[in-house]
């Protein structure tokens, strides 16, 4: 995953905002981009969701204008934010930061490098940014991430936890 920038969707931003670990993005990604559609999704939740509120000013600092969707993305009928993440990654080689299963499938079909919130935490552990991953993984699960217990345990085993 050697791309020089990451394009981030709302779910990872909100989850990392909820657990107060947006700093991991700054530490792990050489460049960060948030499509305007993603900012709109984060803004929509900011009045009722502490994670979205925490992520909002951070996201605005990394904003880019939405692109015209390529047919190869539009045909997937994803949400506006997910579609823009993928469109941006296709326009400028980038890592797609997505949690949604259908959006991840589209990104994989487009042969894009991909990471999700769980992967960010695991990478932070592998690079020594955090001493253990389990507490943060448990926090994102409690904060609303749709991770199965089997996936959590398998992922943590990859970092020796």
Image: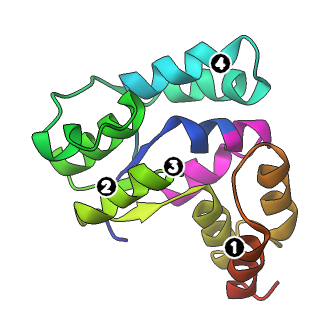
Stretch of the chain drawn in magenta: 15-30
Residue drawn at x 15%, y 28% as measured from the top left: 68
Q: What element carries label 2?
A: helix
Q: Name the residue under label 1.
A: 151
Residue 58 at x, y percent in the picture? 58, 29
State which tag comes first along the sequence, 1 or 3.
Answer: 3
Q: Count residues near mark 1 (Cα–Cα under 10 Å), then give few for <14, some for 14-19, many for 20+.
A: few
Which of the numbered marks, if any, corresponds to residue 100?
3
Q: Name the residue under label 2.
A: 106
Residue 20 at x, y percent in the picture? 78, 40
Is residue 26 in the magenta section?
yes
State which tag comes first along the sequence, 4 or 3.
Answer: 4
Q: Distance between the residues labelled 4 and 1?
A: 27 Å
State which tag comes first along the sequence, 2 or 3.
Answer: 3
Instruction: Point out the image quarter for the C terminus.
Output: bottom right
Q: Count residues near mark 2 (Cα–Cα under 10 Å), then give few for <14, some for 14-19, many for 20+.
A: many
């Amino acid at each position: 995953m050697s791309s020089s920038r990451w394009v981030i969707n709302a779910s990872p931003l909100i989850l990392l905002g909820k657990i107060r670990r947006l700093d991991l993005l700054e530490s792990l990604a050489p460049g960060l981009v948030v499509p305007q559609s993603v900012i709109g999704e984060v803004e929509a939740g900011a009045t009722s969701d502490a994670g979205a509120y925490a992520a909002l000013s951070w996201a605005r600092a990394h904003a880019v204008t939405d692109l015209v969707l390529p047919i190869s993305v539009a045909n997937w009928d994803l949400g506006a934010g997910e579609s823009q993440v993928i469109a941006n990654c296709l326009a400028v080689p980038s890592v797609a930061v997505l949690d949604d299963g259908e959006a991840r499938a589209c990104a994989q079909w487009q042969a894009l490098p991909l990471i999700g919130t769980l992967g960010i935490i695991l990478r932070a552990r592998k690079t020594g940014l955090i001493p253990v991953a389990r507490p943060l993984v448990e926090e994102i699960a409690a904060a609303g991430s749709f991770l199965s217990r089997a996936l959590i345990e398998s992922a943590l085993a990859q970092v020796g936890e």
